[in-house]
Each structure stands twice: as structure tokens, then as C-alpha cells.
Image: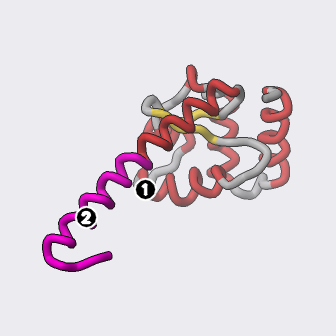
Amino acid sequence: MPRERILSAVNEWITANDNDVFKVDFLRYLLEHAIGKGNAVPTETIMENIGFNKRTADFQQEILAPLKRERGFFVGSCTRGIFLVASIEDAKETAAFYQSRIDAETFHLNNLREVMMQYNCQI
């Protein structure tokens, strides 16, 4: 995973979307402070530094989720915070984080199904 190409893709996105102030400020912050899993920054710290004064859920929906759908780069997550994925190790860390979340939600779903089966309801 060529780090330079990824960072170039981020900079190209910033240039093409300079009117999207919070996303641009967010990506600039990551470029300066959070490249790679070892430099993950907590969400609240990022929000404070870019002046995003809404709820964390709003940050996730308005900034983080749309950027995670981009194709030239990936904003990773782990238990320590958010970072730009710049290596295979970063990608593996993010994948493991997502898998643990998927496993927890799968457990909840299975539990819901079992509870509903006690009442002869199948979902």
C-alpha cells in the first residue's frame, strides 16, 4: 500500500472539495496528526480541533461516514481513535475493529431472535 499515493489522494480530495469546510479541515487535521494507527486521535479531540461543535453522532454521520465511502483513501478507526490508513497494518487494525463491532451486533441480533422465539415469534 503506497503511502505517498494515499496521501496524494487525500490532498487531491481536499483540492477538489475545498468548499466542504469541515471535511477539508478534518482531513487536514488527519494529515498533520493522524497518519497510521499509531497516531490515532480520539474523535472528541478532532472535533474540538476542527471546531465541529455538534454531537459526536452528527460528526460521524456528516463527516466520518461520507469520507469512509471515498475510494482513493480510507479513514480508519480503532479503540484509540481515528486515523488515515497508510499501511497494511493500519488496514488490518481497522478490519479487526470492524469485525469486533460486527460480532457484538451479531450476538445482539441472535439474542433478539431467541427472545422472540420464546413468544412464538420468528423474525
The residue labelled by disc 2 is 112
- Would you say residue 71 is visible in this rendering? yes
Q: CA distance from mark 2 to mark 1?
A: 25 Å
Above or below 10: residue 57: below
Residue placed most toward the observer, 85 or 58: 85
The residue labelled by disc 1 is 57
Query: Residue at (81%, 40%) from the top-left corner?
Result: 11
- The type of residue carrying mark 2 is Leu
Query: Residue at (70%, 57%) from the top-left corner?
Result: 20
Query: Would you say 34 lies left or right of 113 here?
Result: right
112 falls in the magenta region: yes
Query: Would you say 101 lies left or right of 108 here?
Result: right
Residue 83 location (% of width, % of height): 59, 33
How busy is the neighbourhood of tag 1: few (under 14 within 10 Å), some, or many (20 plus)? few
Residue 90 location (% of width, % of height): 62, 28
Magenta span covers which residues?
102-123
Q: Residue furthest bottom?
A: 121
Query: Residue at (72%, 52%) from the top-left corner?
Result: 70
- The type of residue carrying mark 1 is Ala
Q: Residue furthest left?
A: 119
